[in-house]
Amino acid sequence: MEKIPITRAGFDALEEELRQLKSQERPAVIRAIAEAREHGDLSENAEYHAAREKQSFIEGRIKELEGILARAEVIDPARLSGSVKFGATVTLIDGETEEERTFTIVGEVEANIELGLLNIRSPLARALIGKEEGDCVEVRTPGGERSYEIVSIRYG
């Protein structure tokens, strides 16, 4: 099985989500199913069908999280330095707009571009890997070629 690289913060967030699903969401949906059953005829009971659908989603997410956590390889970026690699927080300047953006390169399961968490498999992250401060990278995006200059790289 392939290991899944993840930061400590990402691992902790997934563990917390799993704990919440098991300790709160799962028991709540079981109660909702029991209550809906008491209303009689299940074939036309919308509450029952909605609760069963939610239960299916919760159980699927629990299995997914357990699989991810079992294969997770927690990497501590504070112990890293040098060129861009997993866990690096990279500040870039867009060559076209002069806009400064900061991204942290993380594993696929914790990526969230709105929060500045860049998937290590994304085109931008792949272009940045191995580069140093001051380097420029060219990235092919859906909107065309973009160039970025690496302003800073930090870990931890």
Image (cartoon, rainbow, N blue to C red):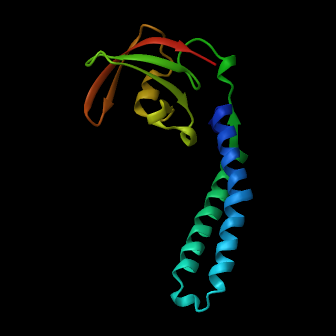
Whether residue 14 is situated above or below residue 84 in the rendered picture: below
Residue 143 shown left or right of residue 19 in the figure: left
Which residue extends farthest bottom? 41
| Residue located 56% across and 32% down the image | 106
| Residue located 68% across and 41% down the image | 72
Q: Nearer the viewer, residue 143 or 93?
A: 93
Visible in this render: residue 66? no
Q: In terms of image quadrants, where is residue 49?
A: bottom right
| Residue located 69% across and 71% down the image | 30
Q: In terms of image quadrants, where is residue 99?
A: top left
Q: Position of residue 29 (x, y in %)?
A: 65, 68
Whether residue 70 is situated above or below residue 147 in the rendered picture: below
Q: Position of residue 46 (x, y in %)?
A: 51, 80
Count of residue discs: 0
Visible in this render: residue 74? yes
Residue 112 shown left or right of residue 41 in the figure: left
Whether residue 34 is situated above or below residue 77 in the rendered picture: below
Q: Position of residue 25 (x, y in %)?
A: 66, 60
Q: Nearer the viewer, residue 19 or 141?
A: 19
Residue 28 shown left or right of residue 109 in the figure: right
Residue 142 shown left or right of residue 85 in the figure: left
Q: Position of residue 1 (x, y in %)?
A: 68, 47
Q: Where is the C terminus found, in terms of image quarters?
A: top right
| Residue located 49% across and 18% down the image | 90
